[in-house]
Amino acid sequence: MTDIDRSLLIEGLGKGLRVIECFSDQHPRLTASECGRLAGLTRTAARRYLVSLVHYGYADTDGKHYWLLPAILRLGRSYLEAARLPRLAQPFLQRLSMQTGETANLSVLDGHEVVYLSRSNSPRVISIGFHPGARIQAHLVSAGFVVLASLTDAQLDAWFADAEFGRFTAETVVAPEQLRAMVLQARQLGYWLAEQYADIGLRGLAVPLLDRHGRCVAAMSITFQSRAYPGDDALLKLLPPLQEAAQLLRGVL
């Protein structure tokens, strides 16, 4: 992040953004008191931000509880439409999807979650995987492991220090020591194959996306059905075109 003059900051904007971020799967509807507690604000201050969101069409209320409206998606859509990386990656994802017959994805690490920025659907009738804008805990998808593998050991220490790991399937690994060992293995391999960590029957294969300076800026991945690639077939058939696509895209980053 670029150093900025903190005297230029609008503190109220930052607080308003914290209020928006309070809403989640666990907290789809909030009272002003609950929102204030989550955002680190007083009830009165939280209520003013919530009422403002209602006024501008980003939220609604029944007089006690508040919830976000679909209009809030315009904020995230602005990034997806303006960001350079998803636009550059899309043709490469489309080519990869046509080559493999599977869904190809571009994603980044945001805190302890992977955020999907772009994808090209499988040519199959049924498409699987995550849509742009979707977020999922990093330890549940292959992309999380390859991006984490690009961090320094000190950065990994900090990341694991306050991470929480939910279990979604019997294959989900939640032990921090084991997860860290898997990240280090992904660093050595240069890829990671996730075996039904988030959904039964689905696997994911990811490689880091590097720029021309060798910095990891994202992950490219393929989502596919487990039964379609028994044994090592996924590595034999999907890894080479995935690595090729990441290498080609690196030339324009």
Image (cartoon, helix red, strand yellow):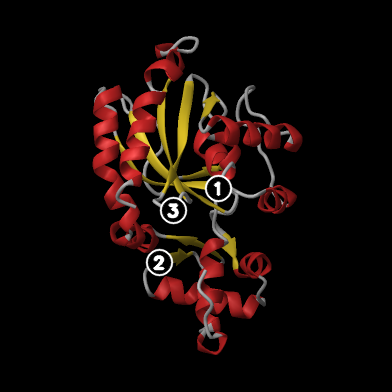
- Give residue 58's mark: 2
Image-based side of 246 in relation to 188, left or right: left
Front in this rendered view, residue 146 or 251: 251
Callout 2–callout 3 Cβ contact below 8 Å: no
Name the element at disc 1.
strand
How far is mark 2 from mark 3, CA to CA?
Answer: 40 Å
Q: Residue furthest top?
A: 230
Q: Residue at x 55, y 29 (%)?
A: 189
Circle 1 residue: 113
Residue nearer the viewer, 186 or 72: 186
Tell me the amino acid under the disc marked 1.
Glu
- Quadrant location of residue 131? top left
- CB of mark 1 within 8 Å of CB of mark 3? no
Q: Going 27% across and 52% down the picture, which residue do you hit?
A: 87
Instruction: Compute the Cα span from label 1 to label 3.
Output: 25 Å
Residue sitting nearer the eye, 240 or 67: 240
The disc at residue 183 is none
Residue at position x 50%, y 38% in the image: 143
| Residue of label 3 | 213
Q: Position of residue 31 (x, y in %)?
A: 60, 65
> With 116 as the anchor, is 141 left or right in this view?
right
Residue 145 screen position, x and y as percent = 57, 37
Amino acid type of the residue tagged 2 in the rendering: Tyr
Mark 3, secondary structure of its residue: loop
* Cα distance in 3D space between marks 2 and 1: 24 Å
Residue 175 versus residue 12 in the image, above or below = above
The reply to whether dot 2 and dot 1 touch (C-beta < 8 Å) is no
Q: Amino acid at mark 3?
A: His
Classify mark 2: helix, strand or loop. Answer: loop
| Marks 2 and 3, the one that precedes in the sequence | 2
